[in-house]
Image: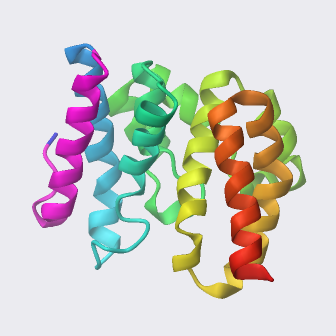
Amino acid sequence: MPLEASAGPRAEAMARRIAGAAERAALTPAARALLDRAFRLAMGPRVRLLADDHHPDFLHPARTALILLEDLGCRDPHTLAAGAVCETLRPELAVSAAEIRASLGPAVHAVVAAVPVPALAGEELLEQLVAGDHAARIVALAERLDHARHLHLRPRAEWAAFHGLTREAYLPVALRTDPTLARRFRWWCAMFERRFLR
């Protein structure tokens, strides 16, 4: 699946970076192809709706997949592909469930469907995160972590609520899921509060 013509050189460079990381991780050719297809699928709405390829949301799919692949050592192709197409913050940039199922298969769709969307989960977010299987939890955490890392580039009015929800729901799940994610979330929550909220 090619990137849309207007995707630009940054998207193509990121596609090459993902391919290189997948090759270094010794993913099978089929797994590498699935991850590439997922990234290109996820870029469709972003190319159409984001005029600036430096917008913090533009390369979010790739960064989430790279957190899973490089930081967490994930090698499951369905989990990696789910990370690339998962979008819980901006629904207008999300790939539809039907497209995910048709292009990437039911296994990828099942992981994405198990990742809770905070705006829909409401007060049940923490419970839904805890109830998810390992694949859904690490995708949810990696995706949130990438959004968190770019929060300072979003409107200031969003900062306190995003930080509070991350500290109250995602940090506890990270602490019980993966030591690398626990360390990253703990550091980010403390750093962001100290630097931007006090």
Q: How is the image coloured?
A: rainbow
Q: Is residue 164 magenta?
A: no
Asked if residue 50 lies left or right of residue 166, the reply is left
The location of residue 169, given as percent across then percent down, is: 82, 49
Q: As displayed, is residue 87 above or below residue 68?
A: below
In magenta, the rendered stretch is 2-27
Residue 53's quadrant in the figure?
bottom left
Residue 82 visible from this viewpoint: no
Query: What secondary structure is the magenta-colored segment mainly?
Result: helix
Tell me which residue sits at (63%, 41%) in the image.
140
Residue at the image position 36 percent from the left and 48 percent from the top? 62
Residue 182: image location, x then y, percent:
71, 40
Give x and y (percent) for residue 158: 68, 79
Residue at 64 percent of width and 47 percent of height: 184
Instruction: Say which of 55 and 73 sits in front.
Output: 73
Residue 155, placed above or below residue 68: below
